[in-house]
Amino acid sequence: MPFGIIDVMNAGKCSAVLSNRELFDHADGGLTTEDNMVLLCAYHHTLIHNTEWQVNIHNGLA
């Protein structure tokens, strides 16, 4: 799966450690498959859980 730049405005807050995150949450029926996963640094993973921030896919890139 190709990955693009997630958040240019906050790129300096990213760490080198990445974790998998489901695009569509498992609790909402999302599957744990490669097509439903994105790699996020800890900063952006926290944003997903605690704010309205979200990942958008355009032409197969996050």
Image (cartoon, grey):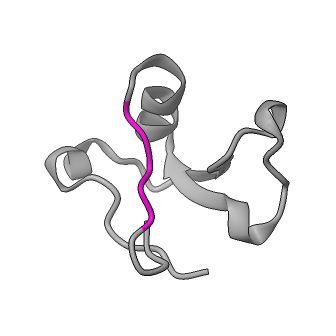
Q: Where residue 58 sits in the image (x, y, percent)? A: 39, 71
Give the residue displayed 42% in from the left and 80% down from the top: 59
Residues 17 and 37: in front is: 37
- In the rendered image, the residue lying farthest to the top is 50
Q: Main secondary structure of the magenta part?
A: loop
- Residue 27 versus residue 8: which sits nearer the camera? 27
Q: Residue at x 82, y 64 (%)?
A: 33
The residue furthest left is: 9
Q: How far across and how far down the image is residue 9, in percent? A: 15, 47
Residue 48 in the image: x percent, y percent? 49, 32
- Left or right, residue 29 beside residue 40: right
Q: Quadrant of the C terminus?
A: bottom left
Q: Quadrant of the N terminus?
A: bottom right
Direction from residue 43 to residue 20 in the image, left or right: right
Span colored in magenta: 53-57
Q: Is residue 60 above or below residue 13?
A: below
Q: Which residue is depicted at the point 45% across and 65% down?
A: 57
In this orientation, which residue lies closer to the viewer: 57 or 5?
A: 57
The extreme front residue here reads 29
Q: Residue at x 41, y 56 (%)?
A: 56
- Decide if residue 35 is on the left or right side of residue 14: right
Q: Could you tell me residue 22's position as x and y percent? A: 69, 48
The vertical placement of 28 against 31, above or below, is above
Left or right: 26 in relation to 53 = right
Magenta includes 56? Answer: yes
Q: How many marks?
A: 0
